[in-house]
Structures are given as C-alpha cells and as structure tokens.
Image: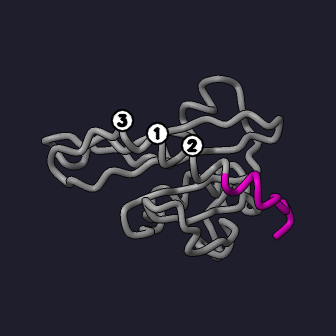
C-alpha cells in the first residue's frame, strides 16, 4: 500500500469510526456504520450513515465523511476506516466517491469489536474506476 499507516494510526481510525457509529441514524436498516477519514494533513473527519424513509435518500457513512471533509476544504485522503457490526464493505456508490479523490487511499474494514478484518486500497475495491480521465475526448 502506497500510504503505509502505523498500527497506532489504524487503531485510532478504527476507534474513531466506532465512536462515531453511535450517532448513526438507522431506524429502518438497523445497521449503524461509522467511518473515520484521515486527510493528508493528519485531520480525522468522521461520518455516519443516515437512513431515510424514502430509501434512495439514505446516505452511507463513507460518503458523509468524504463530503464533510470536502466541504471543509480537504481534497487529499490517506485512509478511511469503516466499522460495522460484521465488517461490511463500502457499497459501489461509496467506492466511486472514494475513487474521485484517490485510488491509493487505504481502506480499513473493522467490526464493532475493533478487530481489523481487511485492508486494501480503493483501486482494489474498484478496479478500472470511472474517473476524470474517462471524460477526456
């Protein structure tokens, strides 16, 4: 992985994602997810999933973290930890949003006990991603 994180950094990201998870709004899915995004300048920005009775309006924790970071001026990310009860992986929409900001961003998947179950880069989750280069004539 290009952006090597220390074990302490990984643990901190997982802990932050797990803490954020308690604020998830999941009355329909009952599947709280927390995400902790590490910016290139070392800031950690968290997000949670937010259900909506109109299901398409629901938003995932990963996208909340990315959109929150972007709205605060960040454009470069080193890693994101995603914590669910069972180590769920980012959905396709989240993979595409993460790809927009860097195929080398590390993804750390953990369960609610804080156990890291998998680590990979965005490029591993979304090979041949559609990106800005795809829009060139």
Residue closest to the eye, 44 or 95: 44
Label 3: which secondary element:
loop
Residue at the (36%, 62%) spot, across then down: 85
Task: State the separation of the CA atoms marked 3 and 1.
Answer: 6 Å
**Residue 31 at x, y = what percent?**
28, 56
Q: Is residue 57 above or below residue 10?
A: above
Residue at the (63%, 44%) spot, across then down: 37
Q: Are marks 3 and 2 in contact (CB under 8 Å)?
A: no
Residue closest to the eye, 2 or 97: 2
**Range of residues picked out in magenta:** 1-11
| Circle 1 Cα neighbour tier, 10 Å, few/some/many (<14 / 14–19 / ≥20) | many
Q: Are marks 1 and 2 in contact (CB under 8 Å)?
A: yes
Q: Name the mark on residue 16.
A: 2
Label 1: which secondary element:
helix
Query: Which quadrant of the figure has residue 99?
Result: bottom right
| Circle 3 Cα neighbour tier, 10 Å, few/some/many (<14 / 14–19 / ≥20) | some
**Residue 101 at x, y = what percent?**
69, 49
Residue wearing tag 1: 20
Residue at the (20%, 40%) spot, across then down: 52
Q: Are marks 3 and 1 in contact (CB under 8 Å)?
A: yes
Residue 137 visible in the shown view: no
Residue wearing tag 3: 23
Q: Is residue 1 above or below residue 7?
A: below
């Amino acid at each position: 992985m290009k952006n090597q994180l220390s074990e302490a950094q990984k643990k901190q990201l997982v802990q932050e994602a797990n803490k954020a998870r308690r604020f998830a709004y999941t009355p329909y899915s009952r599947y709280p997810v927390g995400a902790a995004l590490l910016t290139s300048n070392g800031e950690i920005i968290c997000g949670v999933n937010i259900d909506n009775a109109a299901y398409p309006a629901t938003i995932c924790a990963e996208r909340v973290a990315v959109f929150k970071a972007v709205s605060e001026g960040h454009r470069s990310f080193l890693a994101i930890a995603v914590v669910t009860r069972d180590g769920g992986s980012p959905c396709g929409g989240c993979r595409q949003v993460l790809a927009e900001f860097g195929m080398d961003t590390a993804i750390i998947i953990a369960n609610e006990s804080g156990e890291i179950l998998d680590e990979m880069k965005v490029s591993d989750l979304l090979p041949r991603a559609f990106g800005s280069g795809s829009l060139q004539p």
